[in-house]
Structures are given as structure tokens and as C-alpha cells.
Image (cartoon, rainbow, N blue to C red):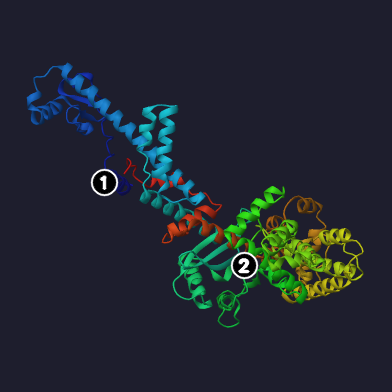
């Protein structure tokens, strides 16, 4: 018992003493006679040199020692002198605080203006040459000189705007990469084009899952330094994927055009991507395929198209003829004053060009007759005009299909249904026109009705029937995919799925029997419906998303190249536009507040 007591006593003796809480000294107004005030955290501050001492220096002897050693010439000054010094110190601190706040506001304003410049695709110099002077003029007139002077502190130089855009673009890219990493799958769409400086640019879009919906955004726009081969394109794409920590094994779709560099079986981009991404399914852009299928025509119709383009070029290629034709149209009160030029690479060009020519056929005939052109004879030929009216109607139908294949948030099942519907219409039209019925072609029907019975158009009907039949064959050649086995993805409550495994068929039966899901299916987009069921029916949703996620066309790339053309003009031929293009095309907002916090606010420079 005694040993136990001794041991216990020893431990108590060895315990360290409790740490004493430091004493917090309080300020006394009498300390101002020594030239000291107090800060917010209870530390003495000299009103003369603004030096801040430790709290334990809050003693008259230490404060007096500071005054005598560092400000010996002020030891005999009265208290009123130090009060004036205190007022000056307070005013100086408030001025510094005000300037710091203004500088932070200027920094945020600089980012906001740079973002608008990038969104509109304007040159970076427009900030200091137009936006800032205009804003100062407005403030000077509407508010006053002081407000205009404040705007002068906002950084708006060309280099500053370029840095702001680059920083916001980097932030948007970081957000996008993080969203892709959080998505179970992603799909790519890419195309290559040449800018005004002759530099080949590779533009890539990505589609991924974000907050239970399918979203799409620009991934990158990079120049191709040398050749535009499949290997060169793959190297740029593969480098970006690996540098940003993305996984090829989660890529399920790749959509490109039909160029050899993209489609080559061994060296093409699609083949190279499939070697590193086993889940990837390559899709040939459906809009490009539709344009290719519509190219082939019978000799008669092809000659009419060629002669129509010659007529248009004869008028449009000569400035004098173009002006005189515009004056003639004005005098005749026409609905249009000019013809349209035909551009082979534009999807809707042929239909619009021929329609404008057909609407102004009277004015064109009169003008060509006045200038004594041999091309006027075509406009006197009833068969030629009837063939032109047929082409107008057919290309109008093709343009309607083309437009229905364009747009955002489309998938292969939706576009395949539209192509299939058009192919069935071709059979219907061919049967009716072979019997001499052309009601489905309004321009042709009106022309034949106006011509009366004086002309025989049976040969045109036969040519049109052959054209429609050939058009159907071309569509069957370019659109070979059969998506009937995925009908259950379009409508899981009606269609069966005999090709699925027994487990997935059982899940589909459970899904069909859920009336709550039937209401959800009728009230939301198809892709959102399947994304919402990922936790409940993972196997079905996995298959459905691999069908719905890939791009069906390169529409976004084509639209992006149009914006690139507006950004990179002959006056900005050397500009690096990836950052501007990202802010212009991306749906993700840059985190401007976070960017401002990471910077030290500065006045305009």
C-alpha cells in the first residue's frame, strides 16, 4: 500500500505545470501622450511612424522608450500634436482601404469586359480603343467626372485582355476536364479545316454526362503543324487525352466526315482510335452522307443545273451586270434584287440558288435578252424551265432533310428515323410522278398548270422517276446501319428486345410495368430518361447510353469553323484563337471570382 502511494505521488510530481494564458493588456487613452494609438487586435501603434508593437509592449515605460529613441525631437510635443497625427493616420488607412477595394472591383471589371470580347469574337484592342473611352464618355455625361475617372483605373490594354481571356479559358477547360472525368462515358466529334492563314486547325467537341443530363462542349482547337494525315490528327488528339488525364477506355463514340485521313482502315484516325479505345464506335457524319447521296443526278437534270449556274455566274461575276440587274429588279418591283452564287461546299447552296433563279426567271430572261446573251434561250425553253422547277422542289425537300439533321443534342436513333422517313417518301414520290402526278412538287405543278396542254412533259416525269429511284439507291448505299434492334431504346414501353440477355430482358419487363416511369418517359427527353435510371437499371442504361451518347453529325464542328472564320480574319491572321474560341463556344462559365482572389489587385497599367 505504501509503494502504491509513493508511485502515485511521484507521477503527480513529474506532471508538467499548466501553461499560463498570456495576459492581454488594454489600451489607455493616456498613452496618446507618448504618440501611441491601438489597432483592432489590441496592439499599440505609433501615430508618427505607424509601427505596430507587440501587446506586451502596452506599458507606459516601453511606449515612452520608443518615443525617446526613435522620435527624440517630439518628446516635448503636446497631446494635441499627437491627436493631429492620429487623424492623419486614420485618413491614410481609409484611403488605402478605399483604393484596395476599387482595385479589386477594377480587376473583376477587367475580367468581365474580356469575357464579353471573347464571346463576341472581337479584337483584344477594342477594349482600350472603343469600350473604355465610350464608357468614360457615357459616365462623364450621365454621372460626372469622378465616375469617368474611376473607369480609367480599369486594366484594358491589349495584353491585359489577352491574359484575362487565357486565364478564363484555362479555368473553363479545367472545369470541363473534371466533368468528363466524373462522367462514366464520353464521345468525341472532330473535324479539320484550314484558316485564312493556311494553317490546318483541328476542332474537337466532347459529349458527356453532367448532372444526369447529356451535355456537349468544345474540347480543344489545335493547329496541325505539318500534314493532315490520320497519324498526325491522332497524335494531337492522343496527346491532349493523356496530358489531361482522360481515359480512352471510357470513350464510346467518334464522329468524323468521310475523308480518307479519318476513315482509312489501317492508318485512318478511326482505326487508330479503335486500337486504344475498344468501346469506340465510329460514325460517319449523317449530314455529309445526305449531301453525298444527293449529288448523283441524270444527265438531263445535271445539264440543267450546270446551265443554271452558268446563267448566275454570267450576271454575278461581272460587277456592272450585277448592278444593272439589281436596277432592273427594282424597277420591276421584284421580291429580290440579286441572284445567289452557287458554292459546292455549302450544304444548302443548290436549293437556295435554284429557287432564287426560278423566282427571278422573268427578270433574268429580260436582262439576258437586253445584253444579247446566248444563255437567254434556256429561259424560252419550257422543258428546261420545267426541269428547273423540279430541281427547285427536290432540293427544297433535300434541304429540309438536311436542316432536320443539324442542331445540338441529337443522337443516331433520331437522325436515322428521319433519314428512313425521307427514303420512304422517295418511294411514294416516284410512284406518283411515274403516273404523271406531281402534286408533291408545288413549283413543278404550278408551272405545268400555267403551261396548259401545249407541252408534253412525260419525258420529264420519266427522268424525275429515274432520279428519285437513283436517289433512293444512293441513300441505301450511304445509310447502311440498321438500328431496329435498338427500338427498345426509343420506346421501352412498346418495343420488345429479344436480342438482349435474359437479365436485361427481365429488367426491361420491370421497367415496362412501372407506371411512374411511363409518366417520366413522356415528360422528359429520351437521353434524360435513361440517365435518370442509371442506379435502378444499370445494365439497360449502360447499353442505351452507349447508343445515345455518340454524336450523329459534325454539325458543331462546322458551326465552330464558321465562328473561327469570323475570329481569324486577314487582320488577325497570326492570332492564336483557341482561348477566344473556347470562351465563345463553351457553355461553361468561368469562375471570375476565384480568378480575382488568386491575383493581387493593381491599378490600370
The label on residue 345 is: 2
Left or right: where does residue 162 sit relative to residue 330? left
**Residue 76, quarter of picture:** top left
Residue identifier under label 1: 14
Residue beneath the point at 30% across and 30% down: 95
Classify the position of the C terminus by image quarter.
Answer: top left
Query: Residue 575, how many percent across, how many down?
Result: 42, 59
Q: Of the numbered discs in the image, which one, if any, rests on residue 567?
A: none
Nearest the eye: 37 or 174: 174
Q: Position of residue 538 (x, y in %)?
A: 69, 63
Left/right placement of residue 262 relative to residue 517 reads left
Q: Residues within 10 Å of mark 1 (few under 14, many from 20)?
A: few
Q: Please name which of the two marks, 2 or 1, marks the residue nearer to the observer.
A: 2
* Residue 187 showing in the rendered view: yes
> How far is the residue under mark 2 from the one under mark 1?
92 Å
Name the residue rendered at 77%, 74% in the picture. 300
Q: Along the polypeptide, which appears first: circle 2 or circle 1? A: 1
- Residue 65, image x, y percentages: 11, 28
Which picture quadrant has residue 393?
Answer: bottom right
Q: In the picture provided, is 52 more to the left or to the right than 337? A: left
Foreground pick, 100 / 456: 456
> Is 414 or 223 nearer to us in this picture?
223
Amino acid at each position: 500500500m505504501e509503494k502504491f502511494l509513493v508511485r502515485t505521488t511521484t507521477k503527480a510530481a513529474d506532471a508538467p505545470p499548466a501553461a499560463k494564458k498570456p495576459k492581454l493588456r488594454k489600451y489607455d487613452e493616456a498613452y496618446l501622450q507618448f504618440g501611441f494609438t491601438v489597432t483592432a487586435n489590441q496592439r499599440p501603434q505609433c501615430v508618427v511612424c505607424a509601427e505596430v508593437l507587440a501587446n506586451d509592449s502596452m506599458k507606459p515605460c516601453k511606449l515612452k522608450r520608443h518615443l525617446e529613441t526613435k522620435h527624440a525631437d517630439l518628446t516635448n510635443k503636446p497631446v494635441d500634436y499627437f491627436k493631429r497625427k492620429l487623424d492623419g493616420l486614420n485618413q491614410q488607412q481609409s484611403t488605402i482601404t478605399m483604393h484596395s477595394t476599387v482595385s479589386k472591383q477594377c480587376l473583376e471589371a477587367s475580367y468581365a469586359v474580356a469575357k464579353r470580347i471573347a464571346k463576341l469574337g472581337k479584337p483584344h484592342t477594342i477594349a482600350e480603343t472603343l469600350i473604355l473611352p465610350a464608357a468614360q464618355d457615357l459616365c462623364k455625361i450621365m454621372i460626372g467626372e469622378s465616375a469617368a475617372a474611376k473607369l480609367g483605373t480599369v486594366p484594358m490594354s491589349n495584353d491585359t485582355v489577352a491574359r484575362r481571356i487565357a486565364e478564363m479559358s484555362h479555368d473553363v477547360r479545367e472545369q470541363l476536364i473534371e466533368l468528363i472525368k466524373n462522367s462514366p462515358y464520353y464521345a468525341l466529334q472532330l473535324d479539320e479545316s484550314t484558316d485564312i492563314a493556311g494553317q490546318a486547325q483541328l476542332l474537337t467537341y466532347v459529349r458527356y454526362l453532367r448532372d444526369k443530363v447529356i451535355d456537349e462542349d468544345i474540347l480543344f482547337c489545335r493547329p496541325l503543324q505539318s500534314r493532315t494525315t490520320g497519324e498526325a490528327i491522332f497524335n494531337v488528339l492522343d496527346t491532349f487525352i493523356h496530358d489531361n488525364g482522360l481515359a480512352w477506355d471510357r470513350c464510346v463514340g467518334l464522329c468524323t466526315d468521310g475523308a480518307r485521313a479519318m476513315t482509312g482502315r489501317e492508318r485512318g484516325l478511326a482505326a487508330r482510335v479503335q486500337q486504344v479505345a475498344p468501346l469506340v464506335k465510329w460514325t460517319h457524319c449523317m449530314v455529309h452522307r445526305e449531301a453525298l447521296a444527293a449529288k448523283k443526278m441524270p444527265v438531263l437534270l445535271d445539264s440543267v443545273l450546270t446551265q443554271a449556274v452558268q446563267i448566275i455566274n454570267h450576271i454575278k461575276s461581272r460587277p456592272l451586270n450585277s448592278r444593272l440587274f439589281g436596277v432592273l429588279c427594282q424597277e420591276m418591283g421584284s421580291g429580290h434584287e440579286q441572284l445567289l452564287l452557287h458554292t459546292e461546299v455549302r450544304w444548302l447552296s443548290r436549293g437556295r440558288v435554284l429557287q432564287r433563279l426560278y423566282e427571278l426567271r422573268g427578270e433574268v430572261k429580260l436582262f439576258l435578252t437586253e445584253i444579247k446573251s446566248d444563255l437567254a434561250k434556256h429561259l424560252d425553253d419550257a422543258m428546261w424551265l420545267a426541269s428547273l422547277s423540279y430541281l427547285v422542289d427536290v432540293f427544297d425537300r433535300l434541304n429540309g432533310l438536311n436542316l432536320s439533321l443539324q442542331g445540338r443534342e441529337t443522337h443516331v436513333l433520331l437522325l436515322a428515323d428521319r433519314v428512313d422517313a425521307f427514303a420512304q417518301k422517295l418511294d411514294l414520290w416516284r410512284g406518283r410522278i411515274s403516273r404523271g402526278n406531281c402534286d408533291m412538287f408545288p413549283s413543278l405543278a404550278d408551272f405545268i398548270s400555267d403551261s396548259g396542254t401545249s407541252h408534253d412533259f412525260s419525258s420529264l416525269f420519266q427522268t424525275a422517276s429515274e432520279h428519285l429511284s437513283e436517289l433512293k439507291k444512293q441513300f441505301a448505299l450511304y445509310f447502311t446501319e440498321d438500328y431496329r434492334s435498338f427500338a427498345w431504346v426509343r420506346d421501352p414501353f412498346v418495343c420488345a428486345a429479344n436480342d438482349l440477355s435474359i437479365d436485361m430482358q427481365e429488367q426491361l419487363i420491370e421497367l415496362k410495368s412501372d407506371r411512374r416511369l411511363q409518366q417520366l418517359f413522356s415528360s422528359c427527353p429520351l437521353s434524360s430518361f435513361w440517365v435518370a435510371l442509371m442506379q435502378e437499371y444499370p445494365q439497360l442504361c449502360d447499353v442505351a447510353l452507349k447508343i445515345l451518347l455518340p454524336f450523329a453529325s459534325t454539325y458543331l464542328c462546322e458551326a465552330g469553323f464558321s465562328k473561327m472564320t469570323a475570329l481569324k480574319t486577314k487582320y488577325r491572321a497570326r492570332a492564336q484563337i483557341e482561348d477566344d474560341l473556347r470562351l465563345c463556344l463553351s457553355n461553361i462559365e468561368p469562375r471570375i471570382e476565384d480568378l480575382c482572389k488568386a491575383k493581387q489587385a493593381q491599378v490600370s497599367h
